Structure formats: C-alpha cells, structure tokens
Amino acid sequence: MLKKISTDKAPAAIGPYSQGIILGNILFASGQIPINPATGEIEGKDIVEQAEQVMKNIGALLEAAGTDYTRVAKTSCFLADMGDFAAFNEVYARYFTEKPARSCVAVKTLPKNVLCEVEVIAEV
C-alpha cells in the first residue's frame, strides 16, 4: 500500500504529485527546490543559500516520514550550472554525512529558475 507524505514544513506540491510516497519501508521524496514553505517564495540568491533551503525542505520531509538524513540511500541532484558544484557539495556534505549513493547533473532549466533541486530515497 502506498502512503502519501505531506507536511506544511516543506513546500506544497506545485503540480500533480505528492511531496513523498512510502512504499513498504522506503520513502520516495519528490525533488525539493529552495522554496520557503512559510512564504512560498524562493529563498536565497546564490547556490549556497538555495542549497541550504533545499536541505531544510528535505529534512522536513524526512521527519514527516519518520526518518532522517542518516537513512537516505540515494540522492539525485540537479544543478542549473555545474560551476556551482563545489559550493553545492559543501552544503550537501554537512547534511548527508553517511554518504549515500548519488547522481549529480546539470540541467538546462529547473522549476522557477532555481539553481538546484534534490530528491531522495530513504529507509523509514
């Protein structure tokens, strides 16, 4: 059975999808962009500020699902500019201390023209 995860501590879905889905003991979290859930606005002007907000949003989804960063098995990271990779990585490393499997790619454009988006798969 699929269980939908929803929290007001992370941005609401801006399309026809769920913030996250638990299947068995696995959370599949939708990609998070740097929207401040309290204001609905993009948080941060540079990659460091935006990545920090993305990580806060991911943390809120993990908490809502009853898990945390230490149980993340896989991340997919999307950057608007691969030139931001090193700065993004510094923020990422502070949160994903268990070093989950990861993909990181540059994409042409992200929703709302943000600089990064991250999705996770975690054990619950």
Image (spheres, grey):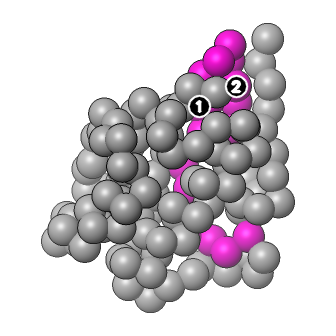
Which residue position is annotated with label 2?
Answer: 22
Residue 28, numbered circle = 1
Residue type beneath disc 1: Phe
User: Is the C-beta separation of discs 2 and 1 under 8 Å?
Assistant: yes
Kindly identify the amino acid type of the residue bearing the numbered disc 2.
Ile
Residue 40 belongs to the span the image colors magenta:
no
- Count every numbered label the image shows and give the total: 2
Per the model, the C-alpha gap separating discs 2 and 1 is 6 Å
In this rendering, does residue 32 appear at all?
A: yes
Name the residue nearer the viewer: 53 or 72: 72
Residue stretch in magenta: 20-37
Q: Secondary structure at mark 1?
A: strand
Question: At 36% across and 41% down in the image, what residue appears?
Answer: 98
Overall secondary structure of the magenta stretch? Answer: strand
Q: Residue at x 59, y 79 (%)?
A: 42
Q: Is residue 61 left or right of residue 108?
A: right
| Quadrant position of residue 95 | bottom left
Residue at left offset 68%, top offset 55%: 60
